[in-house]
Image: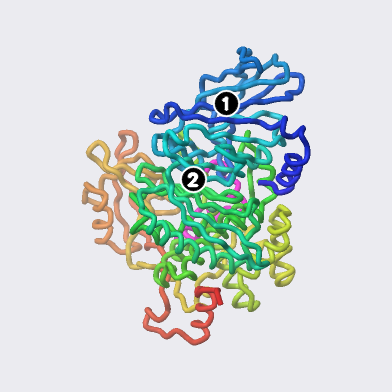
Amino acid sequence: MIRLKFVAATLLLFSTRLAFSQELKYEISFPNAVHHEAEVSLDITQIPAGPLTIRMSRSSPGRYATHEFGKNIYNVKAFNASGQELQISQVKGDVYQVEKHNGNARITYTVFGNWVDGTYLGIDKTHAHMNMPATFMWVKGMENRPVSIKFNDLDKYGWKVATQLQHKGGNTYTAANHQYMMDSPTELSAFKVHSWEDINTDKTKQTISVSMHSPDAQPVVDNFGKMVKRMVDESKMVFGELPKFDHGVYTFLQDVNPENSGDGMEHRNSTVIVERSQKVEGNEEDLLSTFSHEFFHAWNVERIRPKSLEPFNFEHSNTSSELWFAEGFTQYYGSLILKRAGFRDLNSYCNTIAGLANGVLNMPGANTYPATQMSRYAVFADAGVAVDQTNQINIFTSYYYYGATIALALDLRLRSEFKLSLDDYMKAVWKTHGKPEIPYTVPDLQNVLAKLTNKSFANDFFGRYVNGIDKNDYVKLLSNAGLVLRRAAPEKASLGMIRLSPANGKLRLSMNTLKGSAAYLAGMDNGDYFLKINDDELKTPADLNTLLAKYKPGEEVNLTYEHRGEVNTVKVKLQESNSFEVVPVEKTGKTLTPEAEKFRTAWLDSQIK
Ligand SMILES: [Zn+2]
């Protein structure tokens, strides 16, 4: 993840014999793949005097919450150079120590993994889908040593290797150091490949490769690969060039199976894309959205990198105030690029914008806390596991959506007030921080904007909309492009966002009620049984809408609900449905002006000349 360290360690690897002998040598074998186990060994030489500490990670690059990978390793043993067993003790759940060694040790253990996504480990006869922090222990204090990994049993299962690690020969792959190794997810399977050569703006050539583990035939893979290329070419226009990939190759590691847990996880020279579809064929346009989001990360987060994520801490997740930019701006471009490349039509893009408005402008989190604070909540929200309930619905707004609405406003304001665009801003951030790999802070982002526009605009924008909780005037901004943001059904009576699931012959609220909504004001909450609106009983989840349709916003009704065995009836005033829609002005009976059409085209059409 860190270029400086990467280069330094590469030089060390090739220039000194010392480095070779210091190499941390891993081997991984799959004698019991059917029961999701792998056997791992790690040879360590030149161990300094004192205890040797080996541990599993508690976080993973690109995942912002803490995960306990140590729970899935067992049979941890240590041996000396002559194969005699050494005493090893488990000093913490995921930390092991060898007190006595003579400078050499072999650590062996079994790892279990049956979860296919971008964070964990999934092993069976069809593949070993490895996220490194979920698979490999590492040595404290030896993070700068070069690493090699030998993947065994490839012939036994008919597997090939897809990874951003460097191929050293045979089944052995290398990484310059611990950070790069942990950032290099690896798929062992009988995947199919579609790859092409990209000629960059400076005429250098790189390979982009889609490796696809799915039941699809090669022509499907090739056709999909061509769609991915169109997306890559459109993304390249935002920054003006592709990043320089470390070994001249970028790989999409795609795994498609209905048993998967869906995910996309960016890395420096590759991305893991895990889909739950039966196959790629017929689902191409859907699947592309993860590709466009993750590929945008090759610039934004991998190289335009928040200082708060450097270096990546494998013992406790890093906390970052910048995810509204790293994830949110990526979210914005993920769908914009698909629209520009012709994979989404105007209606579908309008729905995307409406989704942002609903997910942010109507949410108590975004109306109470700034995007920077919501970014820091990622350590709990990003696939973080909680046994107890949280109040996320009222205190948290996804930094993906929050950041994407900020990106949308900034794009439309740069276009309407400065004859610039967000692409110009992204290019400027790329030149200042991404290409030279100088990690940034929020004030750095503000400085780049000040240079592109002026100090007072950048001060105002960051002060009010990034560090503050003001919201831009989206109705006015979207009207520049002939798009109408409005309430979708203001005539509908509403209790607020409610999720009902059948339980014990009744209907139970399975989510906290939204602060300020009629249901919230009535005192109803998660776990309560919703029994009646006036005298009408609720029997199925669909009854909620049918019964509410009898009333108008502003009317008073009695809500009857049961909380821990106690039945309450409370009178509340029904509110108007606040959900948003975005409609092209020409579909509202008005005309699209030539200026608005020009604005819309410049924003949403292909940037490839
Ligand atoms: Zn992302």
- Residue type marked 1: Ser
Q: Is residue 577 above or below residue 321?
A: below
Q: Position of residue 93 (x, y in %)?
A: 57, 23
Q: Position of residue 599 (x, y in %)?
A: 53, 80
Closer to the camera, 554 or 188? 188
Q: Which residue is mark 2?
A: 392
Q: Which residue is mark 1?
A: 41
Q: Is residue 376 left or right of residue 507?
A: right
For label 2, being within 8 Å of ligand 1 is answered no
- Residue bounds of the magenta highlight: 358-381
Q: Is residue 241 above or below residue 514?
A: below
* SS category of the residue bearing label 1: strand
Q: Position of residue 442 (x, y in %)?
A: 69, 56
Q: Is residue 371 magenta?
A: yes
Q: Position of residue 579 (x, y in %)?
A: 40, 63
Q: Which residue occupies 48% across, 69% down?
A: 341
Q: Which residue occupies 26% across, 42% down?
A: 502
**Residue depth check, mark 2 versus mark 1: number of the one nearer the observer:** 1
